[in-house]
Image: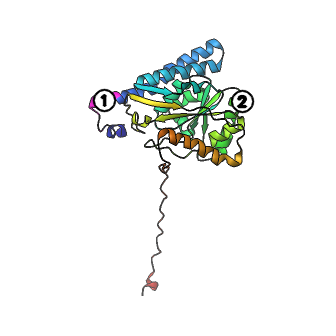
Amino acid sequence: MIRAWADRKDLTLRQTVSGIARYWLAYGSVLPAAAAGLATGVLSGSRWAGINATGTIWGELAVGLTGIDLDVQGQEHLWSSRPCVFIFNHQSACDVFACARLLRRDTFGIAKKEVRDKPVVGLVMDLMGTVFIDRANHAQAVHALQPAVRALRLGRSMMIAPEGTRSPDGRLLPFKKGAFHVAMATGVPIVPIVFHDSWKRLHPHSGIVRPGRVKVTVLPPIPTKGWKASRMDEHIAEVRRLYLRTLGQKDEAPARPRRAARRVTRRRPSRGPEETP
């Protein structure tokens, strides 16, 4: 809340209060969506029918409550090559709301394990089949992605932000390899979703939504059959260049935040009386 107040700057008091209310209402809308999804799942006897209902309703409610207008180009690519791996550049929480609205059904997400600890949202995402990974533990992260491989082979699509975290200012961060290894292992295409300046609608960590237009570009599916693990870095670099061109950015990604190394100060032993010159 302190960060939200500090981020108000050019906003009036009314816009600030409205923006904070929109933020919490968008997150809170997962509750009625989950309730509707639960009822759908029970009545139909299908867990995925319930998951699809929850995702669709949450996407509609959350985007509507934020007051964000999605201007989508290439929407046909969202449906032309499923199952697939949807990747998106992560600029703000609005991206997740928008993906829920755009993808709608038969899709599961990949998220960092910290999201699971968030009240309500973490529980609902867990029930929706989200795969949580520990970014600090490479071996555990690779093992955790095995359910994603099985789900893709069963016809579900995967949604993931290959940057692994939100960009602080909209500049594209380096891509991690997990999404690309999963796509190659299953032979499904990659469908890039590009968000343009969504961080301006909801600054990272601010908690104030600024209603307005967000341009979304869905690029054509990228086949992964024929990819080789030995050339993975080249494949990833090629996909990332597509993002840079679409965003009109140069390859000048901000450095990932790192924890400052703790400085250890060693105390010199005091000299005893016999050592005094």
**Mark 2 residue crowding within 10 angstroms, few (<14) / some (14–19) / many (20+):** some
The quarter of the picture where the N terminus appears is top left
Q: Which residue is mark 2?
A: 153
Helix, strand or loop at disc 1? helix
The x and y percentages for residue 214 are: 43, 30
Q: Position of residue 171 (x, y in %)?
A: 46, 44
**Does label 1 or label 2 sit earlier along the sequence?**
1
Marks 1 and 2 close (CB-CB < 8 Å) = no
Q: What residue sits right under mark 1 in the picture?
A: 15
Q: Is residue 163 visible?
A: no
Question: Vertically, is 120 above or below 249?
Answer: above
Residue 240 can be seen, yes or no:
yes
Quadrant assignment, res 88: top right
Q: Is residue 225 left or right of residue 248?
A: right
**As shown in the figure, which amino acid type bears the numbered disc 2?**
Arg
Image: 229 above or below 273: above
- Magenta residues? 9-18
Q: Residue at x 51, y 41 (%)?
A: 245
Residue 83, how many percent across, how many down? 66, 28
Q: Residue at x 39, y 26 (%)?
A: 22
Amino acid type of the residue tagged 1 in the rendering: Gln
**Residue 186 painted magenta:** no
Percent position (x, y) of residue 179? 62, 39
- Quadrant location of residue 143? top right
Instruction: Give the image quarter of residue 168.
Output: top left
Left or right of residue 1: residue 108: right
Give me the C-alpha separation between circle 1 and circle 2.
Answer: 46 Å
Front in this rendered view, residue 197 or 243: 243
Between 245 and 21, the one nearer to me in the picture: 245
Asked which secondary structure carries label 2, the reply is helix
